Image (cartoon, rainbow, N blue to C red):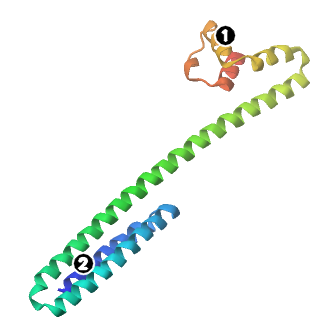
Amino acid sequence: MNTTADTLNDRITDRLDSIERGLPMVPSKTFGLARATVRRTNQVVCAVADRVGDSLGSVSNTASTAAKTTAGQGRAAAERTVDTARRGAAETVGQAEAQVDRTRSEVRDQATGLLDDARRTVDPKKASALASLADLSKAELYERAQERNIDGRSSMDKAQLIRALRSA
């Protein structure tokens, strides 16, 4: 009985170790905590099952069933933990990608402004035209892009509209 449970536990532990190594740090730690909780629960349940089995030889079938149930619950808990870790990692990646997009857009807008400032300094004649585009709202830039029939204008941000209008 114990040999079967130990073998099953070893196989589950090996698989869980493999999964845990493949996770990022925070989900891995969360996964490790869940495993430790399940492991402690298994230890307590096995200790109780052994005492009952020692005291009442007739309940060995019940103890075996309890061990199998505990292993199944441990497996189910581990699977839930892995699913939670995956969802958490996917959400974290999505948030990071959104932040990168926001940062990229901000950097692009700032770079465009700096380049406009530099161009105004170098070529004062074009300064008023450049300044006027940079000072317009996105809606006003969109209107000018419509007037010039610029393709893809509906998906452009302010900096892209300015570049497209300058190129047109």
Please tell me which of labels 1 and 2 falls first in the chain. Answer: 2
Left or right? Give the position of 31 relative to 12: right
In x, y percent, where is residue 160? 65, 24
Q: Which residue is mark 1?
A: 144
Q: Label for residue 22?
A: none
In x, y percent, where is residue 128? 85, 14
Which residue is most to the top? 147
Q: Label for residue 8?
A: 2
Left or right? Give the position of 150 relative to 21: right
In x, y percent, where is residue 88? 46, 53
**Quadrant of the rendering where the N terminus is positioned:** bottom left
Which residue is most to the left? 58
Q: Quadrant of residue 11?
A: bottom left
Any part of residue 42 in sight: yes
Q: Quadrant of residue 103?
A: top right
Q: Residue at x 48, y 48 (%)?
A: 91
Left or right? Give the position of 134 relative to 140: right
Q: Quadrant of residue 166?
A: top right
Q: Residue at x 36, y 56 (%)?
A: 83
Q: Is residue 68 above or below residue 110?
A: below
Using the numbered discs, state the Cα–Cα distance from disc 1 to disc 2 in whole angstroms: 70 Å
Mark 1: few/some/many CA within 10 Å (<14, 14-19, 20+) = some
Instruction: Report the mark closest to the observer, 1 or 2.
Output: 2
Instruction: Please tell me whether mark 2 sits on a helix, a strand or a loop.
Output: helix
In x, y percent, where is residue 120? 87, 22
Instruction: Please tell me whether mark 1 sits on a helix, a strand or a loop.
Output: helix
Whether tag 1 and tag 2 are in contact, CB under 8 A, the answer is no
Any part of residue 10 in sight: no
